[in-house]
Amino acid sequence: MNLTEIVKNNFDQIATSDALVKEIDNVGELRSFDKNTVLLKENSYVKVIPLVIEGLIKIYKEEENGQEVLLYYIKPGETCIVSVMAGERNEKVNVKGVVEENCTTILIPKEKLYGLRKNFPNWNLFIYEQFNEKFDEVVEMIKLLTFSNKEKRLEDYLIKKASLNKSNSVNKSHQEIANELGSSREVISRLLKKLEKDGKIALFLKKIVLLEPSGIM
């Protein structure tokens, strides 16, 4: 499958403009990345913008004490709005982007962003849609971290993460979950054991299975 077909099959808004698809075919580069690859470093300049075809990229803020604050995930058919904004302004980013699940992307050089914005209205519509979606996700994350009790916060996190993976399991260690939820490993382990005792999940080494129909799915 060539790049034109890949774009048309995965990015609906972009696919409505043949000229835009052709331009992305001309300037884009197809690249794959393994899990845990760092694509975006804090306090660094953006060089490329990823259009995700397969896999998952996690965007988060890392505090000085090593604690993570999860902002959002970039899923297939999406891009990184932080990278777009920083690339357009030639500014450093203040977040980190890491491959959560092996991913395939189309990389757009940041130098091409101005031309895409100036010449292709459908590119702007695509970016506006992405901004709205990611804004909503950040708001939901803030609500989750601020207003939910810890057990409800953990349940919602597991459901969302499993949904992103299109499965009934979450392949994370207790420490990794604690980092993303701004908690401690001890608290997360205790809550996971309670959920297991309640028949909502099954715990394995670096894997949590959400149970149905009596579970939390």
Image (spheres, rainbow, N blue to C red):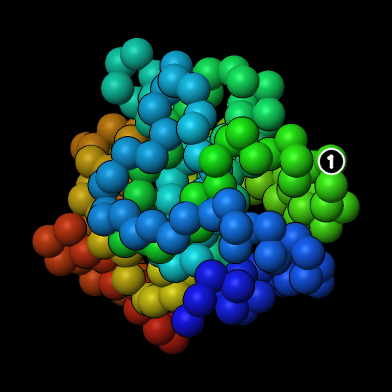
Q: Amino acid type of disc 1?
A: Lys
Is residue 163 something one can see in this rendering? yes
Is residue 139 something one can see in this rendering? no
Along the viewing direction, whichever of 85 and 88 lies nearer the viewer: 88
Question: In the image, 46: left or right of 63?
Answer: right
Along the viewing direction, whichever of 34 and 64 lies nearer the viewer: 34
Point 65% across, 40% down: residue:
112
| Residue 62 sits in quarter | top left
Outermost bottom residue: 213
Residue 20: percent from left, percent from top: 75, 60
* Pointer 1 local density, CA inside 10 Å: few below 14, some 14–19, many at least 20: few
| Residue 101 sits in quarter | bottom left
Point 26% across, 61% down: residue:
171
Along the viewing direction, whichever of 59 and 1 lies nearer the viewer: 1
Residue 123: percent from left, percent from top: 77, 53
Residue 25: percent from left, percent from top: 60, 62
